[in-house]
Image (cartoon, helix red, strand yellow):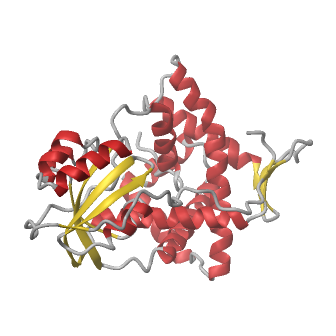
Amino acid sequence: MRRIPATFGLIALLTIMLMGCGGSTATPAAVAPATPAGPQPAPVTPVTQHQPARMPTASEPVAGNSETTVETEPPPDVVAEVNGIAIPMADFQRQLADARAYLLSEGLVDPDTEEGQAALRALRDQVLDQLIDQAIITQAAQEMGLTVTDEELEMSIQQIKDDLGSEEAYAQSLAANNLTEEEFRRLQRQQLLSRKVMDKITAEIPDEAEQVHARHILVETQEEAESILKQLEDGADFAELAKQFSIDETTRDNGGDLGFFPRGVVLPEFEEVAFSLEPGERSGIVQTPFGFHIIEVLERETRPIPDDIKEGLRQQMITNWLEAQRAQANIVRYLER
């Protein structure tokens, strides 16, 4: 039987959780994939003022988060409060059960393994965090003056019915998801409202922006970077050194070529240096959490932003917005972490 589409964020939540539990042995990319490279530049001019420096990253915590966990006897029907507004225990229990059932039915976790057990243990906090975020979004929608009309809700539900094929299939799917019509309409209205908030938050993402076409060599130690920089100053070929020494597996075989990228898609310390260079210039040693980089800028121009990068920018804006909202909210959790 086809299932009703998941409520806001559920599949993303499960994906993030599984990625955190699964892990990968591949070296992570230091920057996001970018568009194909263009023509090669004129001879490179070294720019030596960029020395290794530890700059704050986007992942540093925001001060002022007022979230607390209450250890006293909680209200029997409340799992958390956000700015004094209760999150019903019933919502939490239903979404937790649905998420667990989804993981098991799709074979995304194996409960007989240690990894699978870890994923299921983490699920409770993941679901509660999602409900807290949803409460924050709903409250923000009120402040923004955003609403979902009855007509918009009806059109959305009719589209779901059309996708499922019939009223009967819709009713069966509600039953399979342990949802009443009233509960599903409430969840669907909430999802539509969330989309409006997200669209408003990300409305200023432009269709085109200044971008640089760069390449880099990434190594683990400053000593290695200094050696490579000396070879470059002596006339060695950048692409060949990248193929030989770079630990960035996503760009190494392509001579370290990153293609074009706009601001907001690479690490802040990497971005600051890359966008300070003109075509034909090369940086000194740039330190990031991944290691030590040497960057060359090949081209610089205003270009359309590819859809995949726009989506990445959108997700980052939403993440940053949610982090800021959480830091300002008064959040009380009645479940121990």
Q: Is residue 60 above or below residue 321?
A: above
Residue 218 appearing in the image: no
Question: Which residue is pictured at 39% across the width and 60% down the height?
Answer: 51
Query: Residue at coordinates 34% horizontally, 38% vertically from top-left?
Result: 27
User: Residue at coordinates 48% horizontally, 44% vertically from top-left?
Assistant: 16
Residue situated in front as seen by the camera: 70 or 31: 31
**Where in the figure is residue 53, as x and y percent of width and height?**
46, 58
Q: Residue drawn 28% across and 78% down?
A: 210
Look at the picture and state if 278 lies above or below 234.
below
Q: Residue furthest right?
A: 72
Q: Work out whether 138 lies above or below 21.
A: below
Query: Foreground: 66 or 72?
Result: 66
Q: Nearer the viewer, residue 35 or 284?
A: 284
The single residue placed furthest to the top in the displayed view is 112
Residue 309 shows in the view: yes
| Quarter that holds the C terminus | top right
Q: Position of residue 183 (x, y in %)?
A: 64, 55
- Quadrant of the image occupied by residue 46: bottom left
Q: Residue 45, how many percent across, how many down? A: 19, 69
